[in-house]
Image (cartoon, helix red, strand yellow):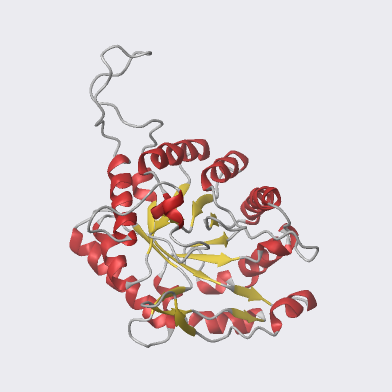
Amino acid sequence: MKKIGFLSFGHWTPSPQSGTRSAADALLQSIDLAVAAEELGADGAYFRVHHFARQLSSPFPLLAAVGAKTRKIEIGTGVIDMRYENPLYMAEDAGAADLISGGRLQLGISRGSPEQVIDGWRYFGYQPADGENEADMARRHTEVLLDTLRGEGFAKPNPQPMFPNPPGLLRPEPYSEGLRERIWWGAGSNATAVWAAKLGMNLQSSTLKDDETGEPFHIQQAKQIRAYRDAWAEAGHTRTPRVSVSRSIFALMDNRDRAYFGGSSNDSDKVGFLDEKTRAIFGRSYAAEPDKLIEQLKKDEAIAEADTLLLTVPNQLGVDYNVHVIDAILKHVAPAMGWRD
């Protein structure tokens, strides 16, 4: 395990029980948590993107702000739903955020998950082409983005421009060198993991995936990662790919931790349906004293296969508590897991 970061969904609820009661709270607390996580020595600050929901939805202003406030920590997403994205505009936004951060952007994207509204991407002006479904559309948007991030010009310049142009065809600006190699695909199945490998994207695998074999979640996820790496090697890419997995992990250090998570009923995998066709398996959560936690995590095959672990955080419990959660893992669990070995 080389890197450990946090993953926040950025929930907010206008309730007295919530420490994050507005969209402004969610955004500003996300920045504060990233700054604090960097001070603790964490490797990454990642944010989930959902539309039509009281959660983080517009990642690039947040990523740019985090990049301006920090110096070392990786900043990323896990994941942006490509059904909703204009890939050229996204290339500009991502390039700007990456330049502001000094090349620390790790951009996780995917075809998305079931959303709060029916076909929400249609309200954003997108629809599948003839013969496509929404997943095909997301992958098409992705391929355009990846091609754009190569940095080659393709747009014919105006012969009488307002400002002088460089020679040749033009590309979206700003362009950030190296960002193309820091794009991650959030794969829900073995097949999409293989597809991501062929296109030269890193792999993000979350706390759920298609239930393809009936085996425990961590075993299926480990097999997904191995299939991805085999496809990467077969494609002939020259760099080493990166792989992350997400987990809900809580070290029970005090009575507050035990009150929040000590009686968790999520200590086993769950099986359900994402839609009428897709049977999915949801991975367990971990909550225990550090020594027991280490024993449990060492049995998780997918964590062993990955190079990056993203800790999902309960952001509505406030920045201070989440700093405590991250600090406990980094100090009392991560070293025994081979962190940064």
Q: In percent of the image, x 50 and y 80: which residue is there?
A: 298
Tell me, yes or no, if residue 178 can be seen here.
Answer: no
Q: Is residue 156 left or right of residue 241?
A: left
In which quarter of the view is residue 134 placed? bottom left
User: How many marks do you count on the picture?
Assistant: 0
Of the pair 272 and 231, the residue shown nearer to us: 272
Q: Is residue 259 left or right of residue 81?
A: right
Tell me, yes or no, if residue 322 can be seen here.
Answer: yes
- At which x and y percent is residue 254? 77, 76
- At which x and y percent is residue 235? 19, 59
- At which x and y percent is residue 79? 46, 58
Of the pair 151 and 86, the residue shown nearer to us: 86
Of the pair 4 and 312, the residue shown nearer to us: 312
Vertical side of 314 occupied by 63: above or below: above
Vertical side of 174 occupied by 50: above or below: below
- At which x and y percent is residue 64? 55, 40
Q: Is residue 246 left or right of residue 165?
A: right
Q: Is residue 6 left or right of residue 238?
A: right
Q: In percent of the image, x 59 and y 38: which residue is there?
A: 68
Q: In percent of the image, x 48 and y 59: which residue is there?
A: 78
